[in-house]
Amino acid sequence: METPYACYLRLSVLLDLQRPRTPDEQPTQWADEHFFITVHQSAEVLVSHALVELARASEDAQAGKDARAAAALHRVTALLDVLEHHLALLDHLEPDSFAAFRPLLDNASGAQSHQFADLFHRIAAADVLGPPTDSLPARQPLATAALQALRAAVIRWQIRHLLLVERMIGDQPGTGGTSGLAHLRAQIDLPPRERPARPGDVS
């Protein structure tokens, strides 16, 4: 019988979602793929709440509640900071181990994540907190500072993700048909001098 804790969190459903395609007869590869799925699914859950908080920040900003909007943006930033460190989990998956089950992904790719794309698109938008109004002709200082911190967190995540992909697959194309590293580099909105160096770059 489920405890109230398990029932409230719907753990029986949640813990049944990690289903590797590797056969049970290959326990080491099965565990590697299970680890990979777990990391990505947990990331998607965190991003889903980041989108909730971003919408709340916009509503509060439009209502002139600067402190509440800033608090929501700080929570999104905290979630992105966790997601950046979350990528470090995959440093415990060796490239050869990933290569062993990578064909089982078919064309699945993180680049296909609608949630990540939506989150980053919204954060980058000039009107992320809504357009100016007659009563609020300019963005309030607390929300402005919080938004700047949030955009910096996105860049940190993108750089960390780029370095992870570089370690895992090098210059191979992405599983979703992208150009891999070149595609990821193009997503990072940094001046050239601040872009992460590629192997062989001369300083």
Image: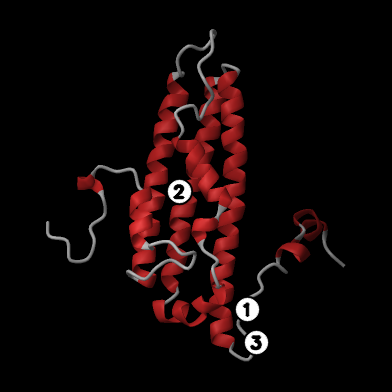
Residue that lies at the very extreme toward the left in this rendered image: 203
- Of circles 1 and 2, which is in front? 1
Residue at left offset 60%, top offset 18%: 63
Image coords of residue 42 (percent x, y): 59, 59
Residue that lies at the very extreme toward the right in this rendered image: 1
Residue that lies at the very extreme toward the bottom in this rendered image: 25
- Local SS, label 1: loop
Give the class, few, some or many, for how many residues have Cα within 10 Å of label 1's Cα (few <14, many ≥20).
Answer: few
Residue occupied by mark 1: 21
User: What kind of residue is marked 2?
Assistant: Asp
- Local SS, label 2: helix
User: What kind of residue is marked 3?
Assistant: Asp
Residue at left offset 55%, top offset 22%: 61
Compared with 141, 193 (above or below) is below
Image coords of residue 117 (percent x, y): 51, 47
Horizontal side, residue 59 vs residue 5: left or right: left
Residue at left offset 34%, top offset 69%: 167
Image coords of residue 146 (percent x, y): 44, 31
Residue occupied by mark 2: 81
Horizontal side, residue 34 vs residue 202: left or right: right
User: What kind of residue is marked 1?
Assistant: Arg
Q: Distance between the residues labelled 1 and 3?
A: 9 Å
Tell me which numbered mark, 2 or 3, is placed earlier along the sequence. 3
Can you say which quadrant of the picture contains the N terminus? bottom right
Residues at marks 1 and 3 touching, judged by CB atoms closer than 8 Å: no
- The numbered mark at residue 24 is 3
Q: Nearer the viewer, residue 8 or 23?
A: 23
